[in-house]
Each structure stands twice: as structure tokens, then as C-alpha cells.
Image (cartoon, rainbow, N blue to C red):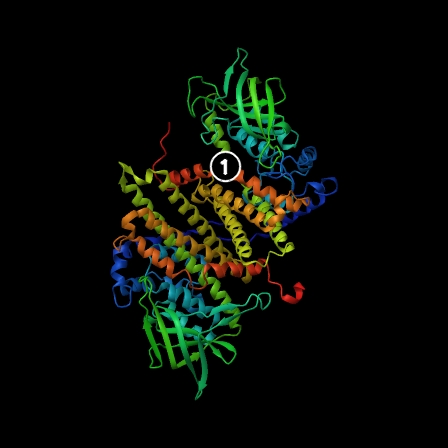
Amino acid sequence: MNLDPSPADEIFRAEIASWMAEHLSGRFAVLKHRGGPGDEDAYPALRREWETELAEGGWIGVGWPVEHGGRGLSIEQQVIFHEEYARAGGPGRMGHIGEGLVAPTLMAYGTEEQRQRFLPGIREGRVFWAQGYSEPSAGSDLANVQTRAWREADGSWRVKGQKVWTSLAHESEWIFVLARSEPESRGRHGLSFLLLPLDQPGVSIRPIRQITGSCEFNEVFFDGAVAAAGDVVGEPGDGWAVAMGLLAAERGVSTLGQQMHFAHELELVMKAARELGRDQEPLIRDRIARAWYGLRVLRYNALRMMSGSATSLGREGLIYKYAWSNWHRQLGELAMDVLGQQADVPAEDFDRLRLQQIFFFSRADTIYGGTNEIQLNQIAERGLGLPREPRG
Amino acid sequence: MNFSLSDEQIMIRDAAQEYLAESCGSEALRAAMELPHGYDPAVWQSIAAELGWCALPVAEAHGGLGLGPVELMLIQEQAGYHLLSAPFFASACLGTSLLSLCADDVTRSDWLPRLAAGEAILSASLPSLGSDRHAGAGESWWQPELSARQEDGRWVLEGDVARVPQADVADRLLLTAWVDDDLALFLVDPDQPGVTLEPLQTWDASRRFCRARLSGAGAGRCDAPGLSEGLRQVVARVRLYLAAEQLGAAQRCLDLSVSFVQERKQFGRPVGSFQAVKHRCAEMMVRIEGCRSAVYGLAALASGKASEAEVRHEAAGARALATETLRYCAGEAIQLHGGVGFTWEYDPQLYFKRAQASAHWLGEPESLWAELAEQLLPVESAESRA
């Protein structure tokens, strides 16, 4: 066990910090700390340009293997990159679904032709992706996919159905979709993982207005939308395995970057407490101390996850989603309690508005990506070996 | 940066796990609790002399293994899992840390080799740390329970120390006392007329404490320069070791509960198949794994180059979290066992009592969180605020 950074790590950290200081300035300065969860509709056009800026600096695909055009950085270095990106106030990434989900999936399950066709656009920050998993009847029961796909005589695919909770669909060029390609199949069998361009007649997008009043998520409707013959990932009918591999990629090294955002949010809470003179109230102090230490614990938990086996989820990995999402939800409650009466009205100061956004948006944290209840089922079943829930 | 245990550390942990599972199970513990000093001398003999656990934290120069907080933390986690009743925490964690970090060279050279070899038991009591939030930012002071004076060229101690762990079996006690307005450290032989040890009949019989009454007790002053700073380091380390013990005990509460709910059937099915029960178990695991991350992280931090202040702040947090985790898990263990969880015969009560007995020692959660808050949001004095 050794938490001390090596000299090489320190140099790398400084390199990123100075790149960020130099580039996240001028016209990009307004993007600092913007575009995160709950704020994803902020400055979409400028954030697209920022993606290109990042790509030119060589900061997209830092963890991809070199043969796929990445930097092939070690886990430690990737962590440092994500931490420094977040510490500098790096804006929410428009390209994270492509970079963090689609690309690793293509590397693991795609064909060489698919990789050559899709990876450059992602790496260069030009082509953005949306994800199509959830459906109105497939939330926690993710395998209950109703969206259908069938093959035409020319080998191309047609898709009919509906996806929901698709973030950034209106800002993206492509979407990946899990669809039922074997008509009589049920559950995780008979699904295919398809790639579709969003700009086509068979696709329509409707924004979902959420608790904060803004629209980050969408419903996406497919009415005979077309996927080219070569745009199925993995074997047709094997889509579930591909989708699960992709979800595993999602719990990656960006976790520590997310924690750096949390640290910034906690600083905003403490700043507000000081400004409003509430930092001397014993009960507020107690909650801030707990929040601060809770975040340290999340960090150690993530470091444990990273030094564990890369393929299987250890105990610390099983509890992580439940732990961070509940921590974040409590931070939102603390933030509003610190603001008191001032929390009633949307703040003009963005630092204060951000606190209000956390309060509302963190209610989603304990729902998406596996609700608290599903998490506890999985912890009990996989972590403790208790009997599985009966399935209909 | 690396969070993995080394092969040697894994070996130490596994050996401790194996020995304790074999020699310190529930029956052995219950039998030990009935013995005159509350533990089995044969177990202590194995731990101290054969397995060499007491040598772990002692510097190599003094005949120890010179290993760090990680190794001791790993043993303490296992000790907590079995509620080890032998004086390992008192002597190897508390006494040895205080001696190593605060005593002068002569005393260390004299006693550390004997402690490392498991030939002597050293218990101690740390002064509590008082603070007045309104006195000014970060001001606090030690509050020892004894006072010392010189009489015919020798030091003499007066006063009562409310709780000294396993003092009745200690060869020496390390105690702090006032010398006028200064804090000083003294080595005391408890086997003298000036010292009366009164064993406390504690609810938690798995770790005994004594009240020590000192009246004209002879003592050797042994503090090295910088006692106050040294004590802060000792407090941080001892909090880590106690937190590790609480982590292990909490894990045991979960393991006992999970195996019980898989066996116990009601309505024709194991109660562990009901979601309400599963979720309670899962919630315990969430808290325990968080606590494990905290304790392991702190041990790694304390072994590295982090500043003492950083270690101290995190030690306050880890200790508060571990106390709350064990208290929660011990309570849940009783609930999940149903009626038998309330009986003497089943083990949850033992853990419930240890949870209580270790909750207030070396800082209770409320004051620990306040201590941490003081670092994050220093109290401004009335003048600076105006």
C-alpha cells in the first residue's frame, strides 16, 4: 500500500494542469465547471468546440491502447488526467459516451472495419454519440427490451420502438440501440446491438423536461429507422453480452474525476456557509465534516476498486454506486439547508445556482444506472450470496 | 499510487485470521471471559511469543520487525472480528505506540525489546484532549488525570485514572500527569503499595479495564522532548487501530447475520430471501465496505509521506465512522437474529456490548466530527469576526 505519488506522476499532473490553464481560457473560460450532470444543456455549441480543442491536445482516448489511436496511459495516469481535468473546472464532456462507452465496446466486440470507421471521429472530437438502453418498460428490468429490429433483404436493419432517458440525443450524430431481433425471444436472449445515425427520417427526438425545468434527457422514437448491414456490434442475437461489457466499461477510471467535481461542489457548500455565517452552527459543521470525510472514503474506495481485479467487481465495486449516489444526494440536501430561505428562488450567482441544481438533480443519481433498490438486491445476491429475487 | 496489500501483508493477515479462527472462536472467548483476568494466558503466549505480533510495530533497532501501521491494522481487524480478549490492543497498539513515540531513549531501549519479544505487557492511558471552541481557532489542551511532584529526588504520582485497559496484567503502566503546568509522561510499576487497581465490572467482558488509584506512587519520568506533539501522533495511530478492530467486529456482525438468515426459515422459506431482510444485510455491507476503505486508506496514509496533520484529521473521521458502523451493525445483527439475537447464548450481544464500550473511548463521534469541522471551518475569534 502506497499512496504517495511518484515523481513521474507529479510531472504528468503538472503537464495537464498547465495545459488546462492555458486552453480553458479566453472564449472557453465561461465553460469552467459547466455542463456537468444537471447542467448538460449549458453552452452545447461551445462545448463541441471544446471537444475539438481537447482532441488537438491529445486528451481524448488517453486510456485507449496505442494501436487504436489512443495514448495507452496507465490506470494511474488516467486517474491523474481525470482528476486534473476536473480540478481545473473542465466542462462536462459531450463526447464521453463515444469515448468511454462506444469506443471500448468496439475495441472489445467490434470488427476492424467498424473500429476504423468510428474510432477516428470519436478521438478527434467530431462525432458524438447517444445511448439507447432504457425503454418505458425496460428500466430496472433492463432486459425487457420491446424495441424491435429486423433484417431487410439487402442486409440492412430496420428498427421500430422507443428509447428513453437518452442524454444529449439532440446534440449527437449517432446512437447505439439494444433491440429485439428475434421475435419470440424474451429477456436477455435474442437482442442485437445496433449503431444508427440519428439524422434520418425514421428517427424523432422529443426532449423530456425534468425536475429542474431544463431538458437534458430525451425520448427517441424509431419508426423503421435504418442501421446499415455492417453496423451490428457482435453477433446478431448476442447484444446483451455486448451491452453488459459496455456497462462494465462505464465503471472506469473517470470515477476519480467525478469525485473531483464533488470536491468542488463541497467547496461551494462551504463557501456559501461562510458567506451566510452558517459555518459556526454546530449542526451544519457536523454535516460538513461528515460530507468532507465521506468524500475521502469514496476516494479510497475508488482506489481500492482500481487496484483490484480488472475483470470482476469486488466488494468495494459492488457498493460504490450506492455509496456515491447517496452521498451526493445528501450533499444536495446539505447545500439547500445551508442556503436556507435563499434556496427558495433560483440563484443568479452560478455558484449558488449550482447548489440548487445538485439538490434537485441528485434525486436522479439514486435512480439511473440501477436504482438504490436494485443496487441493494445486487449487493445482497452477489456480495452476500443471499437468495435471488423471483422473476416473472 | 497503489492500494494493494503486499504479499507479506497478506501473509500476516491470513496467519492472524487462521490462528484466531482456530483458537479464539465464540466458545473459547466465552470461556476466557470467565477466567481471572478475562483472557486465556496460552493465547497470549502464542500471540506474543510464538506468532510475534507484538514485534510488528517495534523498530528493528529494538528487536522488533519495524513494520508500519498497515500490518498492525490488519491484525487489529482480525482481532476485532473475534473480540480477542488478550491484551494485544492495550500493549502492542496503545502501550507500544506511546512508548515508541513519546518516551526517552533510555526507557525505550529498556522496554521495547521486552515488548517485542512478548515478555512484558505495557498498558497506558492517554490524557483526553479538551478544547474550547470559543477560545480561538484550534486551541486545545491535554487533560491528564494525575499530578506529579518530586519527593526526596524521586517522582510521586497522585490521582485516579478512570480507565486503564487490562492494567491488572500489565508489568508497567505509561501515564501522563501534570508537573506544575506542564504535561509529563511517567512509567509506573503497578506492583507497589502506592497503586491500587480496581477491576471494573464492565458490561463488555471481552476487554477488561481497571480504575487505577495512585497515592504517593513512585514513578519514573520518561517523556522525550515534544511530548504534546508526540501524543497527537499516538492518538491518531491508536484511533486507527481501534477503528480497525471496530471494522472487524462489524464484519463479524454481518457474517453472523447472513449465515443466520440463510438458515432460519419462516413462512416456508429462508428469511434471507425476503427483500426487507436482504436490504438490511446489504446496507450493512455498504457501510462496512465504506469503513474498510476508510481504515485501509488511513493506514496507507499513515505509512506514507502525508503530513501528521492530515493523518490526524483522517484518523478522527475514520474513528467516528468505525464507531458508527459497528454500532449500526451490532444493532442490526440483533434485529436480524430475531428473538435469539436478544439471548445470552447467541453472539450478537457480545458485539453489541463491545460496540458500546469502544464508542466513547479516544473520542466519541460527535466530538470527532467537531474536531474535523474545526480544520475545515476554523472558528473565528470574536475580534476577527467584528
Relative to A148, does residue B137 appear above or below in the rendering?
below
| Residue A63: quarter of image | top right
View extreme (bottom): residue: B152
Query: Does A153 appear above or below A106?
Result: above
Q: Nearer the viewer, residue B52 or A127?
A: A127
Q: Mark 1 falls within which chain?
A: A
Provide residue A68's location: percent of width, then percent of height. 58, 32
Crowdedness near tag 1: few (<14), some (14–19) or many (≥20) residues, C-alpha within 10 Å: some
Q: Give the residue at mark 1.
A: A367
Where is residue B211? Give x, y as percent: 36, 72
The location of residue B37, given as percent across then percent down, is: 28, 67
- Point out the residue furthest to the right here: A26
Q: Residue at x 48, y 30 (%)?
A: A139
User: In the figure, is residue A345 to the left or right of A247?
Assistant: right
Query: Which amino acid is tagged 1?
Result: Ile
Position in image of residue B36 (x %, y %): 26, 68
Q: Is residue A56 visible?
A: yes
Q: Residue at 51%, 42% (x, y): give it.
A: A325
Q: Secondary structure at mark 1?
A: loop
Q: How many marks?
A: 1
